[in-house]
Amino acid sequence: MCPLRRRLPHHDDMRHANLSKKSLCTPTARSITTSAPSQATVSDVRIKTIKQAPGYVPVTPLEHQTVLATIHQFPSLEPLRFEKYPANHLYLPTRRDILHRAVVYEGDATRLGTASTKTRHEVHGSRRKVRPQKGTGHARLGDRMSPMLRGGGVAFGPKPRDFSSELPKKVYDLAFRTALSYRFRKGELIIVDNAMELESPSTRLLADIFRHHEKLWGRGRSLMVTLEERPLLEQALVDMDRRKQAILWNKVDVKYLLELSRIIIERDALQNILLSHEEDLTHKAIQPWHKGLVRSLPPSNLESTIGWEDFRQLSLAKPEEKEATRIEVYGNVAAARYGYAETLPQGTKRTEMTLSAYELLTEAKQLEFEKKTGLTFSDYSQNTNTDDFPRAKALDYQISIKNDLVDQTAQTNRLLAEKYLVDVRELELQKLELLSEASLLAAQIFEQLRDTLELMGEAERAEEMLEAARNERTSIEEIELNTLEARVELSRQIAMVAGMQGDFIRQEKMQQEVEAREQELETRRVEIEAQNALLEEASEEVDGAPEETGSVIDVEGRVAEPSKEERSSKEERRL
């Protein structure tokens, strides 16, 4: 037999052999002694400690770090103090992938998905086959609703669907704080401590504020995030065609935070945004009624301003009520500010308050002028033509229609023609009264502008405004005489119609009215001639006298105080 084929001992045989060698008295439990065996060698092990380098500072986790942010004052953006914010709120590393996912998510949510087309089964038409299947030499074609024919259905066209995508809330919160951190790192996040509200809805004031911001922070537009609605700021932005530059904190998204050049945000609005977008840190959802959210931030620095509350109520009013009360509000605020300015001592504050009152009164008169004539005062000042008034054009059109009716009925019905002629005289009188009121308002506006420019020290432009006011006053006298003549003609025409109708009592009454109006016209004509003669004599006397200079503002902001007679004459002219 081959030695390789020898039988190897079986595993069971070996196990039984080992068991047979052990004695029953041999302990099988393991010793629990902790002493080292006698033959073991103890090695001399020394633990080496790593020495720290001098100046070593251990790394603090990001969630325990803080950053300092500057708190500013609106609208000057003057620094007030520093305030600490967690680093995981305003100093996160820029993650473009997170920002991209958030912007795509917001864009998908804004898509309407209302595009819709009709398939061949939804188009109305005949179900008859257009041509035979074979024998015509043309391609196979079904009914009129086939997508291959004009007017048929659309194959694979769009249907209304939801384009919104999904994004975890924690990822979206991280994107919000990443966008704020990106702006903060670049120095484009400006935190203000007070409410971003204006003193008045003035576009010129807001434009000056924006120019000041560009000097401090560079060119570009700013996104203003507010805690609550700021009606005066929003109205000024709408007038400047920048309505998207102001937004509430709960309507801001990541795309808004990345679009414009800088972000000006109220401190409480920033607190609400950070509190609402930290679910990835706290693992708790913030509800709208959470007690940590700031509800209101009143503009305490503006509540003491004269007229600010009136402007705010006007901005919050309904559009139809706003246009009806705007002129009255402007006039009341102007009177209040002028009265307050009279109580102040000579100085810059009094000058500013007086100028503010003058500007408000001028704007109120301009609004009244536009309401009366239908034409803005700026357009009228460039071309002082009363024929361009839309209201005057409407009256001219009605007069032409009535004159055509007079010509048509003159041969057939004379009484009806005379009645139409009464309507013509009434419309002509309305037009003259409109022109008289417009000239009076224009003269008052020019005089108010003259006082404003005189107070600002612009003597040449003040003289131009004074000359324009004189021209308007002259035209007022001419229109006044024409109005009196029109009233005389109207009374005569009414007396003629009354005589033709046999109403002799009314005819006699109208004749007496004609005599009274003629006497009034003659008296007024004599008064105007005498007044013009006195003005000519006064102008000849002062030709050689030195010209009086108006009140100007000196270097310290003081204004030369006019005499009581001059002030009373100015007030009478203004009223």
Image (cartoon, rainbow, N blue to C red):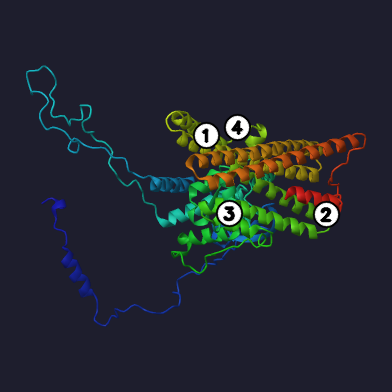
Element type at mark 2: loop
Element type at mark 3: helix
Q: Residues within 10 Å of mark 4 (few under 14, many from 20)?
A: few
Amino acid on which the number 2 mark rests in the picture: Gly
Tell me which label, 4 or 1, sits earlier in the chain: 4
Q: Position of residue 64 (x, y in %)?
A: 57, 62
Residue 325 disc label: 3
Q: In the image, which is nearer the foreground, mark 1 or mark 3?
A: 1
The residue that mark 4 highlights is: 387
Residue 399 disc label: 1
Residue 347 disc label: 2
Tell me which label, 3 or 4, sits earlier in the chain: 3
Q: In the image, which is nearer the foreground, mark 4 or mark 1?
A: 1
Amino acid on which the number 3 mark rests in the picture: Thr
Query: What whole-number distance in Å separates the C-alpha atoms at marks 3 and 4?
Result: 28 Å
Q: Nearer the viewer, residue 456 or 268?
A: 456
Q: Nearer the viewer, residue 522 or 573?
A: 522
Q: Are marks 1 and 3 in contact (CB under 8 Å)?
A: no
Query: What whole-number distance in Å separates the C-alpha atoms at marks 3 and 2?
Result: 33 Å
Is 347 left or right of 73, judged from the image as shown?
Answer: right
Q: Residue furthest top?
A: 137
Element type at mark 4: helix
Q: Nearer the viewer, residue 542 or 1?
A: 542
Q: Residues within 10 Å of mark 3 (few under 14, many from 20)?
A: few
Q: Position of residue 570 (x, y in %)?
A: 79, 49
Residue at x 28% of width, y 38% of height: 158
Is 119 left or right of 185, judged from the image as shown?
Answer: left
